[in-house]
Amino acid sequence: MSPVAIKTLAGQLSNAFMNAGAVPVEAPALQPAEVLLDLYGEDIRGRAYVTDDPVNGEQMLRPDFTVPVVQMHMNDGAEPARYTYNGPVWRKQEPKQGRATEYLQVGYELFDRNDSALSDAEVFALFYNILRPYGLRTMTGDIGLLSAAIDGLSTTDRRKERLKRQIWRPARFRQLLDWYSGKADNLPSRVVLLNQVATSNAETVLADAQPFLGVRSEAEVLARVNSLQEDAATAAIPVEELAVVEELLALNGTAAEALKILRGVQDRLNGFARAVDCLEMRLTALAASGIDIKSLPFEANFGLTSMEYYDGFVFGFFDGENVIATGGRYDALTQVLGQGRSIPAVGGVIRPDVLAAVGGGAS
Amino acid sequence: MSVLKLGVPSKGRLQEKTMDWFADHGIKLSRTGSDREYSGAVSGVDGVELVMLSAGEIPKELKAGRIHLGVTGEDLIHEKLPLWEREVVNLQELGFGHADLIIAVPKGWIDVDCIEDLDAVCAQFRTNHGYRLRIATKYHNLVRGFLRSRGVADYQLVDSQGATEGVVKNLTAEAIADITSSGETLRANHLKILSDGLILQSQACVFGSYAADWSDDAKTALDAMAAKTGWDVAKLKG
């Protein structure tokens, strides 16, 4: 597909978003690296192009529009607000995949403090209707369900925090869950340390490892040893609670089925019913927007590996394995970028280059 | 006339051992002129020119095809050429220059033995100090790829091109990712290797460049070398 044809399609998508009430916005291609590094960690250096400026410090070619649009809104946006953008983003790709490193994104972002379910439904229905002529595969999920399930476990706050930190890294999450539920033995090295500390004490073990170097202090080491001791003495997560998390992770059917299954197990986790209520309200709002929730695909673990800043409703549209559009709710991101302020936000992006290649039902 | 360019390290033990290895296989590499002049001669096979280069330069010279063959460490090839399998072929493991790329932390971190611990400490460190735990290395690509595959994200890499073992003491990083052969320097600097922190096992190898000009004369010279060394050179000639 020629660049001109892709640009034309991007313009059509952009018009569709403007017709839905969005105000067009622009963002600088160069973004301060610090903000993105703070959000994503060192990994972002492997995914975004970094350049250096003697005055402004490290800069990144924007890997997406979400961060600058959120910042812009937090600075001077009226509420509620709908924005759309249309421009290139730059991403390093895994060397062996040979995928595009510069491509257009056309997006729609909605900032609204009122009914979250209605906002979720508005954004999803907009994407769904724009993309319907292309006959794509649709997927939805809800990362909020998993964090609500973790909150509802009968275990320590420390374990809950550790689990939540690993939500986006399924293998590591699985490992923690196995440890915390007693399905897997503690690490051998940790058992050795705990035995040493039990027979003498942590200070003595630390004294044997002198001299002590570095910024991380002896007090920090001792604090973690203490937390490992406490953790080893923590009761395992009850089997019936673990089963709910397992059931949730395995959900793979329609949205209506997922709701029914979760209603059946919700009371086994403290406070989990509220998250299921949210799901139901969203599905009601989607149905009112003309979406058939009895056939809408839903996977509870959808988005966990690729969509790190989303923390609630998530959705995607695919042509085979090619990602055409993704989106979701990212309330927590606005909190991080808002320095104390926050606003519920939901949005999504379409890749016109990949969509153009689908051809088919275009306009 | 010389048609095949062979790049070897320009100094140090790596150069000596490379010359010994080739001598054992009937190919004599020697320096010409003074000891400081980076030029050399080859006897035992015809049509081969010796090019003295820093071991760190050899990967990109191979990639560009400015040399046909080059001797360097696998660590440098993997770090500098992410697509190395498409750009070079490993003709011979030389059995020296052994080095492991590892992650090491202060010995005093008695609570840390493995990557799982490091990940937990990264979270603790960021909360306590307001910045991400720093890992000093010159192998940015390899370390980042390794930690990504292990699900660790809350750290930052800081560049260290030499004397990396000293950074913890100097308070410029909390951990290191570096090459070690015996582990002695690490121990002397009160560092310990994470039990599952081995990123790459490396040794010196002879690599062949796909991008080099494999003229008939170059192929003849390559065959002459292969006859003495037993290399499988079919891929380069294809």
Image (spheres, rainbow, N blue to C red):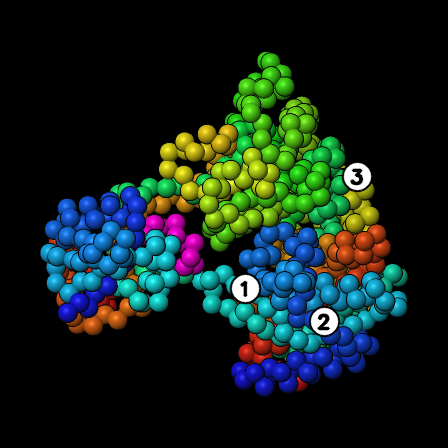
Distance of mark 2 from mark 1, alpha carbons?
A: 20 Å
Earlier-in-chain disc, 2 versus 1: 2
Distance of mark 3 from mark 1, alpha carbons?
A: 42 Å
Earlier-in-chain disc, 3 versus 1: 1
Q: Residue B145 magenta-drawn?
A: no
Contact flag, marks 3 and 2 (Cβ < 8 Å):
no
The image's mark for residue A92 is 1
- Camera-near label (3 vs 2) is 2
Q: Residue at x 32, y 62 (%)?
A: B62
Q: Residue at x 58, y 27 (%)?
A: A212
Q: Residue at x 37, y 62 (%)?
A: B60
Q: Is residue A363 above or below residue B93?
A: below
Residue stretch rendered in magenta on the structure: B70-82
* Nearest the eye: B209 or A351: B209
The image's mark for residue B176 is none
Helix, strand or loop for disc 1: loop
Helix, strand or loop for disc 3: loop
For residue A228, what is the image quadrant? Answer: top right
The residue type indicated by label 3 comes to Asn
The image's mark for residue A270 is 3
x and y, in percent, of residue A360 in the image: 58, 81
Earlier-in-chain disc, 3 versus 2: 2
Contact flag, marks 2 and 1 (Cβ < 8 Å):
no
Mark 1 Cα shell of 10 Å, populated few (<14), some (14-19), many (≥20):
some
Disc 2 target residue: A27
* Residue A120 in view of the camera: no
* Residue B181 in view of the camera: yes
